Amino acid sequence: MGIDFFKVEDALKEAYMRGETRFNAYTVAFWSNQSDILAVNNYLLSKNGNVLEARIEFLCDENNHPTGSIKFGEKIPPSITCHICQNEFIPSLEFSNIIFNFSNPLSRSSTKQEKKKLQLVT
């Protein structure tokens, strides 16, 4: 199918300026009006370690609470305790999400002028 990379980049720039700290391919696809979620996800993964940091977020096996995450490619821990319900569980990729954040997020105290000077594309 394919995606419009310019729209995705524009959506990422706007998210960066808004100070977004956690998002996934579905969110970015929505922001950029793209229908191919897999292509958006692959594009975001291509930016891992550069502009974005990809993480695997595990879901509590009892309540599906998003809890605990590791950097993409790190070894999965033997167990995680849910920070919401205190349930201890064995994390599984089957019950996980790939999430992203910016490698160098703007601080909340950055002025609008400073934000305009920053460039997202590297």
Image (spheres, rainbow, N blue to C red):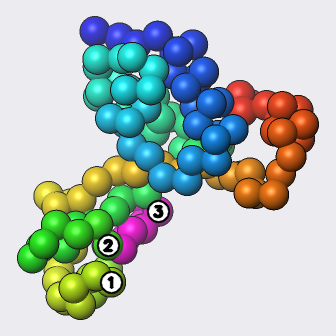
Query: Amino acid under label 2?
Result: Thr
Above or below, comparing residue 29 to residue 69 in the picture: above
> Residue 121 sits in which quadrant?
top right
Query: Which label belongs to residue 6?
Result: none
Residue 28 appears anywhere in the view: yes
Q: Are the two marked residues, 2 and 1, in contact with CB atoms closer than 8 angstroms? A: yes
Dot 2 corresponds to which residue?
A: 67
Q: In the image, is 50 to the left or to the right of 63?
A: right
Q: In the image, is 61 to the left or to the right of 72?
A: left
Residue 79 appears anywhere in the view: no
Above or below, comparing residue 25 to residue 106 in the picture: above
Query: Amino acid under label 3?
Result: Lys
Query: Which label belongs to residue 83?
Result: 1
State the image coordinates of residue 8 (x, y, percent, origin top left). Answer: 51, 22
Q: Quadrant of the C terminus?
A: top right
Dot 3 corresponds to which residue?
A: 71
Where are the magenta residues, as a range? 68-76
- What whole-number distance in Å separates the C-alpha atoms at marks 2 and 1? 6 Å
Q: Tag 2's secondary structure?
A: strand
Q: Which of marks 3 and 1 is nearer the N terminus?
A: 3
Q: Quadrant of the N terminus?
A: top left
Is residue 72 in the magenta section? yes
Q: In the image, is 96 to the left or to the right of 13?
A: left
Query: Amino acid under label 1?
Result: His
Q: In the image, is 3 to the left or to the right of 15?
A: left
For marks 3 and 1, give the one nearer the viewer. 1
Residue occupying image coordinates x 58% and y 23%: 9
Residue occupying image coordinates x 45% and y 20%: 32
State the image coordinates of residue 40 (x, y, percent, origin top left). Answer: 39, 27
Above or below, comparing residue 63 to residue 83 in the picture: above
Dot 3 surroundings within 10 Å: few (below 14), some, or many (20 or more)? Answer: some
